[in-house]
Image: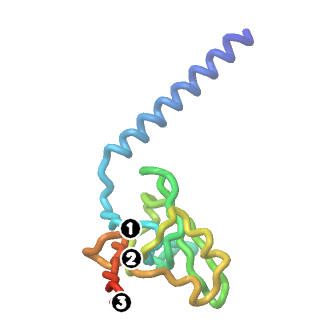
Amino acid sequence: MKNRLIALIEAQQTAKVAALNKNQSELIKQPSERAIPPFQVGDTIDVHFWIELGEKGRTQVFNGTVIAIKGEKPDEFITVRRIVQGEGVERIFPLLSPRVAKIEVKKTGSVRRAKLYYLRDRVGKATRIKERKKGTATTPKKVHKKVKPVAK
């Protein structure tokens, strides 16, 4: 009796997992209706997201620097950080959430790290990130000056 119940429960759980995996694979194949602009860690972005206030709702904008991107589609999350009244505020947004109305890239940053957690310890002008110039190489080229031989 006990083994039959266990087998029945395992079969139900296996069916649920299979259904969830099927739904997730359909989500991956399905193109998202919203066009998400290409951005990377270090970029300054505006995230327009929907908040509900009782029966009403509105779109609120969160402006900040992307300090981390985690996961892969459809489970991709971005961490955005900004300073409000001298206090650091971070929010984690699911990228394909229906609550995220749109994302606008305001400034592209040139960084050499995948996660910018070191910005949490910095204050003021130390949190600035160099802007990535469009149309240039990501790595700077070394320029060697010619040395004139010393005349004897």
Across and down, in percent, residue 82 comes to 56, 80
Q: Earlier in the sequence, mark 1 or mark 3?
A: 1
Q: Quadrant of the C terminus?
A: bottom left
The answer to the question of whether label 1 and label 2 lie on touching residues, with beta carbons closer than 8 A, is yes
Q: Depth check: 89 or 100 in front?
A: 89
Dot placed on the residue nearer the N-terminal end, 1 or 2: 1
Mark 1: secondary structure? loop
Give the CA distance from mark 1 to mark 2. Answer: 8 Å
What's the mark number on residue 62?
A: none
> Dot 2, crowdedness within 10 Å: few (<14), some or many (≥20)?
many
Nearest to the observer: residue 66 or residue 111: 111
The answer to the question of whether label 2 and label 3 lie on touching residues, with beta carbons closer than 8 A, is no
- Which residue is at the far front? 152
Residue that mark 2 sits on: 108
Image spot of residue 146 (x, y percent): 31, 81
The mark found on residue 39 in the picture is: 1
Residue 113: x, y in percent?
51, 65
Q: Amino acid at mark 2?
A: Thr
